Image (cartoon, grey):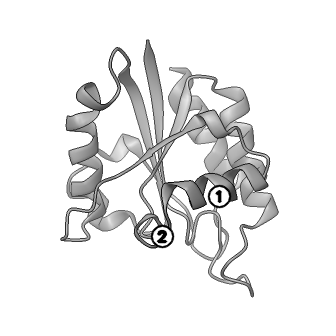
């Protein structure tokens, strides 16, 4: 079985910088993520956010479920490369995916992040979807991700 993977940052994607509370996901951003997951049934989420280091996977799952997002679609988090270089961490997860998910494999992937420059050093441009940190995940970006997975 082949999966599509969304490497998901939180700050600047689900929590826009202009938002007053930094501990609550913006409903409109969550709605766009839900739309991607509803439209792309093979899409699964791997948390690439630095928040993954401060929260257990259990707590991330609790937040996910609290937002009524499909719990079975949040499958992992990227490893901590100790360099804090997100592109390297995504690259490392992709290289280990066949061992981590047998018999599943990665068909296509998308990186949702508000700081794409360091990611683009390691990850091809067509897989990186940059969010404006003040707006987070918008309908336009969600539409591009959906098209990316429908190819």
User: Compared to 107, does 84 lie above or below?
Assistant: below
Left or right of 96? Residue 30 is right
Label 1: few (<14), some (14–19) or many (≥20) C-alpha neighbours in 10 Å: many
Residue hosting label 2: 51
What element does badge 1 sit on?
loop
Q: Which mark is residue 1?
A: none
Choose between 90 and 111: the one closer to the eye: 90
Choose between 51 and 109: the one closer to the eye: 51
Left or right of 62? Residue 59 is left
User: Compared to 130, does 143 lie above or below?
Assistant: above
Choose between 138 and 69: the one closer to the eye: 69
Q: Residue at horizontal 27%, vertical 66%?
A: 118
What element does badge 2 sit on?
helix
Q: Residue at horizontal 61%, vertical 50%?
A: 141
Residue hosting label 1: 137
User: Compared to 45, does 21 lie above or below?
Assistant: below
Snapshot quadrant of residue 42: top right
Q: Residue at horizontal 63%, vertical 26%?
A: 40
Label 2: few (<14), some (14–19) or many (≥20) C-alpha neighbours in 10 Å: few
* Separation of residues labelled 2 and 1 (CA atoms): 17 Å
Snapshot quadrant of residue 23: bottom right
Of the image marks 2 and 1, the number of the one nearer the N terminus: 2
Q: Looking at the picture, how far across and down is residue 30, in whole percent?
A: 73, 55
Snapshot quadrant of residue 29: bottom right
Q: Looking at the picture, how far across and down is residue 67, in whole percent?
A: 77, 54
Extreme residue in the bottom direction: 20
Q: Looking at the picture, how far across and down is residue 124, in whole percent?
A: 28, 44
Q: Nearer the viewer, mark 2 or mark 1?
A: 2
Q: Residue at horizontal 73%, vertical 49%?
A: 65
User: Compared to 13, does 57 lie above or below?
Assistant: above
For the image, the number of numbered tags is: 2
- Quadrant in which the N terminus is drawn: top left
């Amino acid at each position: 079985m082949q999966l599509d993977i969304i490497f998901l940052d939180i700050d600047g994607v689900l929590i826009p910088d202009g938002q007053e509370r930094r501990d609550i996901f913006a409903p409109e951003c969550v709605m766009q993520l839900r739309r991607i997951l509803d439209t792309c049934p093979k899409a699964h989420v791997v948390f690439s956010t630095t928040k993954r280091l401060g929260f257990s996977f259990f707590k991330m799952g609790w937040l996910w479920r609290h937002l009524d997002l499909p719990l079975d679609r949040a499958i992992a988090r990227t490893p901590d490369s100790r360099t804090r270089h997100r592109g390297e961490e995504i690259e490392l997860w992709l290289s280990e995916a066949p061992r981590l998910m047998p018999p599943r494999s990665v068909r296509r992937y998308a990186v949702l992040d508000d700081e794409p420059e360091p990611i683009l050093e390691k990850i091809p441009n067509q897989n990186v979807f940059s969010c404006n940190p003040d707006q987070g995940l918008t309908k336009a970006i969600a539409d591009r991700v959906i098209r990316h997975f429908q190819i």
